[in-house]
Image: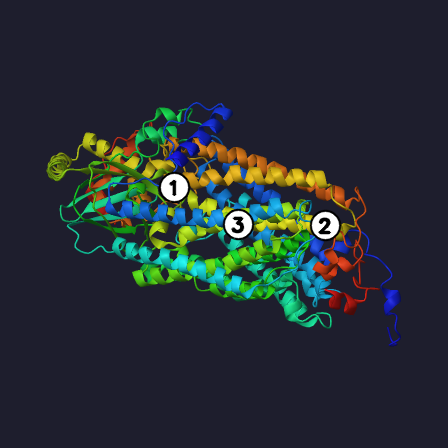
Amino acid sequence: MILHNLKRLFVLSFLVALGETAWADYALNIPVGPTETSRVIYGFHMYAIWVCVGIAVVVFGVMFYSIINHRKSKNPVPATFHENTTLEIVWTVIPVLILIGLAVPATKALIRIEDTSDAEMTIKITGYQWKWHYEYPEEGIQFFSSLDEASNRARQLGSDIDPKTVPNYLLEVDHPLVVPVNTKIRFLITAADVIHAWWVPAFGWKKDAIPGFMNAAWVEIEKPGVYRGQCAELCGRDHGYMPIVVKAVTKEEYRDWVAQWKQEHAVRQAEEAQWSMETAMKRGKEIYNTHCVSCHQVDGSGVPGTFPALAGSTVVTGDVDGVIEVVLEGKGAMPAFGKDENIGDADLAAVITYVRNAFGNQVGDVVKPDNIADVR
Amino acid sequence: MATVADTHGAEHEHGPAKGILRWITTTNHKDIGTLYLTFAMIMFLVGGAMALIIRAELYQPGLQLVDPHFFNQMTTLHALIMVFGAVMPAFAGFANWMIPPMIGAPDMALPRMNNWSFWILPFAAVLLSATLFMDGGAIASGWTLYPPLVLQFGDALPFTIFSVHLLGISSILASINIIVTIFNLRAPGLTMMKMPMFCWTWLITAFLLILVMPVLAGAVTMLLFDKFFDTSFFDAAGGGDPVLFQHLFWFFGHPEVYIIILPAFGIVSQIIPTFSRKPLFGKNSMIFATAVIGFLSFIVWAHHQFTVGMPVPAELYFMYATMLIAVPTGVKVFNWLATMWKGSLTFETPMLHALGFLVLFVFGGFTGIMMSQAPADLYYHDNYFIVAHFHYTLVGGGVFAIFAGLFYWLPKWTGTMYDEKLGKLHFWLSFLGFNLLFMPQHFLGLAGMPRRIPDYAVQFTEFNQMSSVGAFIFGFTQLLLVYIVYKCVKGEGEKASGEVWEGAKSHGLEWNLPSPMPYHHSFEGVDIQKAVADE
């Protein structure tokens, strides 16, 4: 405790010296999260730190004793010894014993953390450049989760929006992952394009999401709450902008959420069955904000020299089959969205309708899912 | 030269050739050492400038200066340039300058190849840097070059890979030269076990390089095939595995970090005895520990991959093997402490840097032990804690040892003492700047900040600001180093004696030579037999 306060004092005095006024919620250490695993990892981390502190006291103690007392002014005639077999055996054996002391609990902890058996439910996580896709196979629920609009506006180069005014800057998403507490949940983790890593610090572990392979991990959250994290494996331009938000709720609230999601989904399907300009544009905007916005930007202006503008583009407003082909097959850095099983023809039709009729583009036509199927 | 008349003596009266051709055509180990060190210094400043761009962008949340894609190019090139352009060539420079005089040899064994192994480097560096100006910029995958991400980059990819090939060839040639020199050109009576630690650590490093560079070259060539010739080594859709690349990369990459740190151990093992006025403690166990570290470096690589989803037994194996490295490393640290113990210490700039090395490297070793613990590494992996860790070992360890060696041998090379006051100032600014730069990154990592992000959540602001201020202090201090070296090379300063440091003659053959050493035959007029016997 005293040590902790000393550290705070040190940091605060430094910040005062810098003339900085906002140090509201910085943290120094691993958070103790709402899961047993997190507590195990935290405990292990602290144990390792104290072992190291112990060794440090000895090593640096000897070193500074020598620096102070064996300097030439105090000890003008150096000793001449240059070996001592007993001593050398001692300082080889003691570290081995210390390491065994670390290895035994580490082995137990690791075996426990990696044991994903007996899960009560499963969620499939797929990493995308640069968003997450969550699927609840038992419930038939699936959705994408990407950076929320407020953060996305503020994070643009030269946006002039102070990140401190954005709630949960870079750690907020449009659709959080909702999970029940006190349930052993197995995550199946994979990726669609490049390697990502799913990491919520409060849960302790992280796991790589590797295209073509399925990794497993688990949590059992004890306290309802919102837990935030980020992608932890460099995955391209917007690696820093694909946060993870997990909303842990009681089992009852979770059941309500599932029911509500299904109901909303049904309503939406009914709406979209009629496929009007209005519904296509509404859904298209959502799809655009999930899949297209990080390159083509909110206003369709793109990034000059890297990502082409959609606003005013003759390709986008030209022959519809041409546009569909580009979206299905991809082009240059643009992924082939037609190959992604998590994006259906209705999604593609909606987003193509959207780009042809937004940002000042005014083609006026409504693309239907059938149009997509025809081009396929 | 039709006769076999001995024109030998007369032929070597002349000094170095004049003009730029001296440097292009030189086969002299001292000139080539200077070339390596000059090149390393330039690349150190280039890579450092990139680091300052990174730290400037990270000074506050939000994007102020650069696009995220350019930020990623900077992190990639910073690492590649620092590892392959600055640190490794610097150690090769020390090897060229010091191995021959330390073992009583007139030059390196293969002088023409020596010229070639250096002159490949500038071309490789230009190729690599030029990718910044290509369509889409340099590759932005991090120096680890993981597929599939790295395969998304365009023109820069083949150039980067070719550059890596060239760097590898250069390293292998230099290694062969060092091994041949050490095995064949030692003065009579200078047995292997009598050889100085610096030569020993470089000998083992050279073997590591020859063993792992081809693995890296193979792995990046497979990338090239996946990109251009439709193979699927790393693509699951074609039956490959992206993680295979990680195994190959780290089979190179882990020994690579020892390639950087072993010569640093060697330099420090020369300096601490000199300024303690005592022989190195436990030299035999030092040699053995170095060899063990070299061996262990080959069997621990997957501790960089605890989160990729390996089977538990594999994770356990790599955890235990990694922990073992602490034992020989501990032996080395204890031996240095025992060397200082009851010595007669003075604290000239080389010794300050050597002690700075010891403090920072041991600290980096502690975080290393923490990260070897697989369960805790699931948290530390790919966050700022690891960034702090490897900078403590590679900069606090590697670069501080380079500083130490530079100040230690500079008077021997130039015949002039460097400015001791400025030298000490350089040490203290570097040491304080370094700690201000990297210490806060431990806390950032523990608090949950991932690495390689251009922008961060606002609770990480304070420590990032401290880190950035430290970065600029550390970075600009290096301009002072350039000035100190420039002054010394110009001959502005006291004349250095042959021994340079009090009592140094008993700590290495090189101190029996005049300062500066004769351009051609270092040992002309010196009784090597007597010098070897005296040691």
Q: Earlier in the sequence, mark 3 or mark 1?
A: 3
CA gap between label 1 and label 2 equals: 41 Å
Q: Amino acid at mark 1?
A: Leu
Which residue is located at x 28 percent, y 45 percent? Answer: A38
Q: Which residue is mark 3?
A: B361
Q: How far is disc 3 from disc 1 in space, using C-alphas?
A: 20 Å
The amino acid sitting under disc 3 is Phe
Which of the two residues, A316 or B218, is positioned nearer the viewer here? B218
Q: For numbered disc 3, what is the local secondary structure?
A: helix
Task: Decide: is B235 above or below A368.
Answer: below
Q: Which mark is residue B446?
A: 1
Q: For the residues tagged 3 and 1, is the chain the same?
A: yes
Quadrant where the C terminus of chain B lies? Answer: bottom right
Mark 3, mark 2: which one is toward the viewer?
A: 3
Residue pictured at 20% horizontal, 29% vertical: A278
Q: Nearer the viewer, residue A15 or B43?
A: A15
Q: Nearer the viewer, residue B332 or A134?
A: B332
Crowding around mark 2 (Cα neighbors within 10 Å: few <14, some 14 to 19, many 20+) is many
Query: Which is nearer the N-term, disc 3 or disc 2?
Result: 3
Chain under callout 2: B
